[in-house]
Image (cartoon, grey):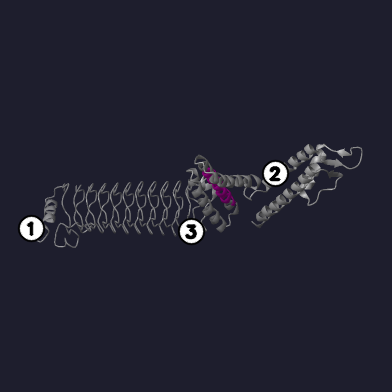
Amino acid sequence: MDQVTPRDVEPRLRGLLDLIAAGTPVCEPGLDLAHVDASGTALVTVALADAESGGLPLSGADLSRARMEEADLSGANLRRASLTGAVGRSTRFVAAILEEADLSEADMSGADFTGIVAGQVKFAAAMLEDARFGQAAMRFADLSGALLDGANFAEADLWGADFSGADADDTVFRDARLDEAKLADANLTHADFEGASLTKASLAGSRLRGAKFTGAKLDGADLSGADLSDTDLVRLNLATCRLRHARFAGAWLNGTRMSVEQLGGAVGEEVAGSYELAQASYLALEQNWKSIGSHDAASWAYKRGRRMGRFHAGRQAREAWVERDGAGILRHGYRWTADRFVEWLCDYGESLSRIARAFALLIVVFAGLYGLTGGLIVLEGPEAGPTYNPLDLMSYSALNMMTANPPEIGLKPTGRVTNLLVGLEGAVGIILMGLYGFVLGNRLRR
């Protein structure tokens, strides 16, 4: 046995090697391997080094709840091994084989998994803060509910991996392959996806505030309900993504391909009743759609943003009413009223039909007022005198609304009240004509 395990090998490692040499399955729950150097380099003189990986041959071993802080298990073969609940802070697993291994609920904070081969490995609910997984092959790995703050998955192959519910602040996925990965409901605040491939990945409901997607590929990704506030989405193609009720307040959007229909009718902030943030979200979308020449979409976002401002003002007015704040009621109430009037009049400067509707309505209103005052006089003919003929009243009102001077059609206004109405209608007509020309000019320029 000494020829297999030389005496200069650390005693705790020697005992483990003796078990392996005996040919019996390794079943050592709670084994203490803290600070042990069991790397392939340290096992050069040991005949039991794994032929496939060059490290410890621990395939199928039960090392649950083992202690291995700062140990070096580089190159170990841990295929289908159980390390559930193990404590391996700052442990080295460089180039190890961990296929189908179970590290659920293990504490591997700061561990080095660079270059591991770990298809279908389980890290469910594990603690992996600041762990390194660079260039790891981890297809269909299970990292659901894991704590991954500051972990590094640069250039890792994570096809189909499950990160559902994981907490991954500041995690690096730069140039990683995350096609069809599950990242739903994960906390990915300030995560770095620069150059990553996320084709058909699910990020539904995830918190991606401040994340970076520069150069990322998101074809067919699901971002429904995701929080993309303050996120870098510049020049990305999101045209095939699901964006229903996603949040964009403060997002960096410029040259980003997407459509109104993808949003499901509203951004996530509006659905949640956060009207002030919804206004900021629609502003970001408006500016983006202007940058790609999608003017109809930009108009839609502009109107939705203005409406969110009105809703916010209404909420503030109600709060001021509850608090008996007179100044607040006047300030917010005036803003709500003014916005509501502008929306009715011209849909915030975007609707010609609403202005035409206002023209028609005011013509009828002023015609009725002229009839009530009896101040329109027929100058000649058998009908000379005050007229109440609807055709006369409507004709005079329409012409007065659309000309600078009172029309000369055989009718003359008399009396102070009627002349005041004539002047008022003329002024309103000038304003509406100017507004109509302004909106028409904007539409023509588009």
Residue interval drawn in magenta: 299-316
Q: Is residue 124 above or below residue 52?
A: above
Residue type at tag 1: Asp
Check if residue 308 falls in the magenta segment.
Answer: yes
**Residue 143 at what x, y percent from top left?**
32, 49
Location of residue 362 in the rendering, given as x and y in whole percent from the top left corner: 72, 43
| Label placed on residue 234 | 3
Q: Secondary structure at mark 1?
A: loop
Residue that mark 2 sits on: 357
Residue 434 can be seen, yes or no: yes
Dot 1: few (<14), some (14–19), or many (≥20) neighbours within 10 Å? few
Q: Residues within 10 Å of mark 2 (few under 14, many from 20)?
A: some
Disc on res. 2: 1
Question: Which quadrant, please, contains the N terminus?
Answer: bottom left
Q: Is residue 151 left or right of residue 332?
A: left
Q: Is 182 positioned to the left or the right of 328 in the image?
A: left
Sequence-earlier tag: 1 or 2: 1
| Nearer mark to the viewer, of 1 and 2 | 2
